[in-house]
């Protein structure tokens, strides 16, 4: 068995970890509240990959290059910039990537011990968690369950999560099929415009605007039968693996 014990101590700002060898292929993802030196030193010492949003607000950290020269991160709107082989406060080696999306008031900066572009892809995958909570509340009304007994509440939540899984898997396949824009190999695509597992497609404006579940439940798109069956064939094996996984459930 692997011993995985990461214990944040928010009063002292320290993290103590014991991570086994099998976890070295994974990356821990943190928001900018965890952008501090002692955490990075612990992760680096334990050889744990990390992806962390840089905190550049009131007290931006000192970043040095390989020659111990101070680096100031700069980026223009609608551009992407990569800084490789930097040192966080001169101590922890990192790669940094920044992206300033159209319509936003400030850029997003991410630091990682992985390749910078890979780290940015991982961070954007984390943002789907926020989208999931929003859809569970506003589309499936998970925050309005009225069960009085705990075991009934658990059953209802489990059923909602099954419905959510079906909706997300189907809705995102529909979103890719309807709103994914085809691109050729010569077209340069920003990391934020890629569609996971769809290398021949890029995100259109509507793809970015709507979640898969919203498209499925609210837009009610009419797709040809042949196209629907193709989507169902893609979704069914994934859903089957979810519901047949040996995890105890009250449902």
Image (spheres, grey):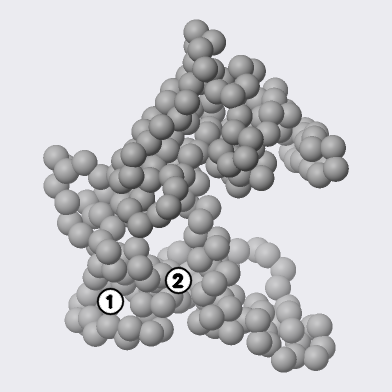
Q: Is residue 40 left or right of residue 71?
A: right
Disc 2: which residue: 168
Q: CA distance from mark 1 to mark 2?
A: 16 Å
* Residue that appears at 72% across and 91% down: 146
* Front of the two marks 1 and 2: 2
Mark toward the start of the polypeptide (1 vs 2): 2
Position in image of residue 57 (x %, y %): 58, 42
* Residue that appears at 41% across and 84% down: 217
**Can residue 24 be seen?**
no
| Element carrying mark 2 | helix
* Residue that appears at 60% across and 64% down: 245
Disc 1: which residue: 229
Label 2, residues with CA under 10 Å away: few <14, some 14-19, many ≥20: many
| Element carrying mark 1 | helix
Determine whether 107 is above or below 217 in the image.
Answer: above
**Can residue 175 be seen?**
yes
Q: Is residue 64 left or right of residue 234?
A: right
Position in image of residue 236 (x %, y %): 41, 71
> Furthest residue to the right?
11
């Amino acid at each position: 068995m692997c011993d995985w014990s990461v214990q944040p101590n928010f009063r002292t700002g320290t993290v103590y970890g014991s991570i086994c060898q099998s976890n070295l292929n994974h990356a821990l993802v943190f928001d900018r509240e965890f952008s501090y030196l002692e955490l990075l030193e612990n992760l680096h010492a334990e050889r744990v990959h990390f992806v962390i949003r840089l905190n550049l607000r009131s007290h931006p950290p000192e970043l040095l290059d390989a020659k111990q020269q101070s680096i100031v991160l700069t980026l223009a709107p609608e551009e992407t910039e990569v800084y490789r082989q930097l040192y966080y406060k001169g101590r922890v080696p990192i790669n940094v990537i920044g992206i300033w999306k159209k319509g936003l008031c400030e850029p997003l900066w991410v630091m990682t011990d992985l390749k910078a572009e890979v780290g940015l892809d991982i961070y954007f995958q984390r943002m789907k968690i926020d989208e999931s909570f929003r859809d569970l509340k506003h589309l499936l009304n998970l925050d309005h369950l009225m069960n009085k007994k705990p075991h009934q509440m658990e059953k209802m939540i489990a059923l909602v999560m099954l419905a959510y899984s079906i909706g997300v898997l189907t809705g995102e396949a529909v979103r890719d099929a309807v709103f994914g824009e085809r691109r050729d190999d010569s077209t340069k695509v920003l990391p934020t415009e890629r569609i996971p597992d769809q290398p021949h497609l890029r995100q259109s404006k509507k793809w970015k605007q709507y979640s898969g579940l919203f498209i499925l439940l609210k837009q009610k798109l009419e797709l040809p039968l042949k196209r629907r069956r193709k989507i169902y064939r893609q979704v069914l094996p994934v859903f089957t693996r979810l519901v047949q996984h040996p995890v105890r459930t009250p449902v």
